[in-house]
Amino acid sequence: MPLKSLLINGFKSFADKTTLTFTQGITGIVGPNGSGKSNITEAIRWVMGEQSAKSLRGSHMPDVIFAGSAIRPPLNRAEVTLVFDNQDHELPVDRATVTITRRLFRDGASEFYLNQKACRLRDITDLFLDSGLGKASFSIISQGRVEEIFNSKPEERRTIIEEVAGVYKYKQQKKQAEAELAVTEENLNRVADIHDELA
Ligand code: ATP
């Protein structure tokens, strides 16, 4: 499931539409301090569903939108598109190429697209749940992450192993099913109350 390309437009320091094409093998990105190398990996994490502004070095999500410079006014929209080669069908979508897009406006409105069709954030996170590419996976190791893993508590390290082993997906699904069950039980209790009142 190699990455084919990344399109960044209005995200952090990328005020202009920028396309990075990944060819076979290893791609190295070099540049002076502060030139935007980390912003590229953050763009990838963001389009794959990152919900924590803090982990993107901001205080709230619109901080990812180009904030302006000495010579340019701020923008009102950030957009990132990631294109995967899915010929191996690692992603559970019946297409040879999979495209995901995330767009955010300064008023907080956000949009997600899967293969150019509007979708929910959940559709994107579900897509990567079992691929080892989730936003919290080890396909992206940012600065300081190695020490963070070494210093993490055993329970935190267990989550990492569960993600790698593919168990995490089922844990998430179980958590969601339990939440739905709790709501259903609550509804049943209300029906029972109403029934008692009418009896
Ligand atoms: P280093 O080598 O020091 O780690 P880097 O190449 O990884 O640096 P980044 O951290 O990706 O650089 O980029 C930092 C730059 O991005 C800073 O100049 C910062 O001002 C700019 N930047 C971050 N957020 C925004 C934003 N919302 N709008 C405009 N510029 C931004």
Image (cartoon, helix red, strand yellow):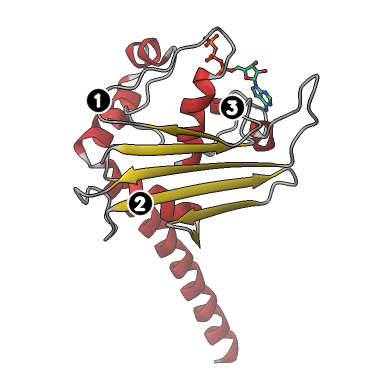
Compared with 131, 93 (above or below) is below
Image quadrant, ligand 1: top right
Of residues 32 and 143, which is closer to you in this image? 32
- In the image, taking residue 190 as reference, residue 48 lies left or right, namely left
Amino acid type at circle 1 is: Gly
Residue at mark 1: 25
Q: Secondary structure at mark 2?
A: strand
Counting labels gives 3
What residue is shown at x 66% (from left), y 31% (from top)? 15
Q: Is there CB contact under 8 Å for labels 2 and 3?
A: no
Query: Compared with residue 89, is residue 21 higher up or lower down, i.e. above or below?
Result: above
Within 10 Å of disc 3 (Cα), the crowding (few <14, some 14-19, many 20+) is few
Q: Nearer the viewer, mark 1 or mark 3?
A: 1
For marks 2 and 3, give the one nearer the viewer: 2
Q: Real-space Cα distance between discs 1 and 3?
A: 32 Å
Circle on res. 49 = none
Question: Which mark is first along the chain, 2 or 1?
Answer: 1
Please give left or right for residue 136 compared with residue 18 in the image. Answer: left
65 and 59: which is toward the camera: 65
Question: Could you say which quadrant of the image residue 85 lies in?
Answer: top left
Residue drawn at x 33%, y 11% as measured from the top left: 150
**Residue named by callout 3:** 54
Residue 198 pos. (x, y %): 58, 91
Percent x, y of residue 197? 59, 85
Is there any visible trace of residue 154 in the rendered image? yes
Q: Tell me which numbered mark, 1 or 3, is placed earlier along the sequence.
A: 1
Residue name at image x 61 percent, y 29 percent: 14
Residue 82 at x, y = what percent?
43, 42
Label disc, if present, on residue 98 of the rendered structure? 2
10 Å neighbourhood of mark 1: few (<14), some, or many (≥20)? few
Q: Secondary structure at mark 3?
A: helix
